[in-house]
Image (spheres, rainbow, N blue to C red):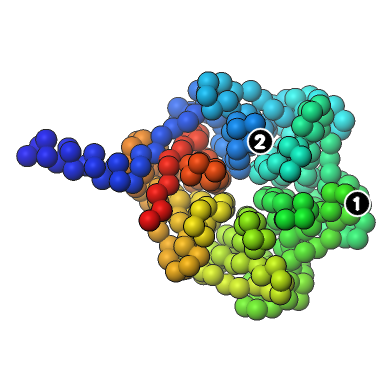
């Protein structure tokens, strides 16, 4: 009987695909075995994993074959310095989100420095592409380096290669044309209210936009922690559509997956949710719902601690920045 139960449990885990820890031992640190409050993460064009280690004030890189890590940007000291130097000589202040452009350059939102920074692919030289380093609002229609941001959190590239920035403190999403260097408001009017269904993008508020993702068809998906809501933005009609206003608890990260699915870091629920765009159904795929740390194995029995970042790679692996458990976890997703 005991052997039968053990076999049954093993089959359940296998059917779900087990979750594993890629890096982290549950304690804060900056080593091949430790992370320090990881947030945004992504697979780079070189196949390595990149993530923001916010309490270490660095962006890190892991070779997934060897599991060896390196600091890609930041000295480890809190600050905002280093224009035009090698990225590891620059001081950062809680980088939150990281993305790559089509040329392989790395961009990240340096949240508490109120800037967006770029690390060149070939030289690893770091430059500021948006923000003055002071919190505030201004500069639309002009050069982004002279414009003010307020706690930029999430970034994403649209199909034209323009950078979208969740400017949380300004209750807007800003858009940066990297060719011209000009910044503008793309979503929101600065009022602290929720968007209206079907409203034009600049005619309705967007209170504290937390995370954004752009699907292959150009549709923009927006998570709002305030109100626990998920929206889509129609790229043709330029209007909001409310997809879900219930079922989340403080969501702070979003990633597009295969077969018209979204994966959402449901931070205060200590879980990762899957949203089916065809049916509107929300399904928990990882996390027990109880704040904690593991164990690895059955993803629905694995306790998490305020996960912030999620990413789905081309092979169907879901990466989770389990922030306050100080781990990065990974699992293969199954979609029927």
Question: Badge 1 is on which residue?
Answer: 180
Residue 318 appearing in the image? no
Image side of residue 282 versus residue 1, left or right: right
Mark closer to the chain start, 2 or 1: 2
Question: Quarter of the image containing the N terminus?
Answer: top left
Image side of residue 246 versus residue 54, left or right: left
Question: Quarter of the image containing the C terminus?
Answer: bottom left
Q: Residue 248's spot in the image, x, y percent?
A: 47, 61
Image side of residue 169 versus residue 316, left or right: right
| Residue 107 vs residue 209, the one in the foreground | 107
Q: Look at discs 2 and 1 and give the one toward the viewer.
A: 2
Quadrant of the rendered structure where residue 81 is?
A: top right
Q: Residue 323's spot in the image, x, y percent?
A: 52, 40
Residue 123 appearing in the image? yes
- Assign a secondary structure to mark 2: loop
- Assign a secondary structure to mark 1: loop
Q: Residue at x 29, y 42 (%)?
A: 13
- Compared with 242, 107 (above or below) is above
Q: Residue at x 56, y 21 (%)?
A: 68
Question: Badge 2 is on which residue?
Answer: 45
Quadrant of the rendered structure where residue 199 is?
A: bottom right
The label on residue 10 is: none
Q: Residue 196's spot in the image, x, y percent?
A: 64, 77
| Residue 192 vs residue 245, the one in the foreground | 245
Q: Residue at x 89, y 57 (%)?
A: 139
Q: Residue 99's spot in the image, x, y percent?
A: 68, 43
| Residue 150 vs residue 123, the one in the foreground | 123
- Compared with 204, 38 (above or below) is above
Q: CA distance from mark 2 to mark 1?
A: 25 Å
Image side of residue 139 versus residue 14, left or right: right
Crowding near pointer 2: few (<14 within 10 Å), some, many (20+)? some
């Amino acid at each position: 009987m005991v052997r039968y139960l053990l076999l049954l449990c093993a089959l359940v885990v296998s059917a779900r695909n087990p979750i594993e820890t890629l890096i982290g031992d549950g304690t804060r640190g900056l080593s091949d075995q430790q992370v320090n409050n990881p947030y945004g993460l992504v697979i780079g064009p070189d196949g390595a994993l990149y993530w923001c280690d916010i309490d270490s004030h660095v962006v890190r890189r892991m070779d997934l074959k060897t599991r060896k890590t390196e600091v890609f940007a930041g000295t480890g000291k809190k600050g905002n310095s280093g224009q035009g130097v090698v990225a590891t000589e620059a001081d950062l202040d809680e980088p939150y989100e990281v993305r790559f452009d089509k040329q392989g350059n790395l961009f990240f939102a340096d949240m508490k420095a109120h800037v967006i920074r770029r690390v060149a692919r070939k030289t690893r030289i770091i430059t500021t592409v948006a923000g003055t380093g002071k919190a505030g609002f201004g500069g639309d229609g002009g050069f982004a380096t002279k414009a003010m941001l307020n706690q930029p959190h999430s970034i994403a590239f649209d199909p034209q290669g323009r950078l979208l920035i969740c400017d949380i403190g300004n209750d807007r999403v800003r858009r940066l044309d990297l060719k011209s260097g000009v910044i503008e408001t793309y979503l929101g009017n600065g009022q602290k209210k929720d968007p209206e269904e079907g409203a034009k993008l600049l005619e309705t508020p967007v209170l504290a936009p937390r995370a954004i993702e752009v699907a292959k068809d150009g549709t923009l998906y927006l998570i709002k922690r305030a109100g626990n809501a998920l929206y889509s933005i129609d790229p043709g009609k330029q209007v909001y559509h409310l997809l879900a206003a219930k079922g989340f608890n403080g969501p702070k990260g979003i990633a597009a997956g295969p077969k018209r699915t979204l994966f959402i870091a449901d931070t205060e629920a200590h879980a990762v949710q899957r949203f089916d765009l065809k049916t509107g159904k929300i399904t928990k795929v990882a996390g027990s719902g109880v704040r904690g740390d593991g164990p690895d194995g059955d993803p629905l029995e694995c306790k998490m601690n305020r996960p912030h970042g999620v990413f789905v790679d081309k092979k169907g692996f879901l990466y989770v920045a389990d922030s306050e458990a100080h781990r990065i976890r990974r699992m293969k997703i199954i979609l029927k």
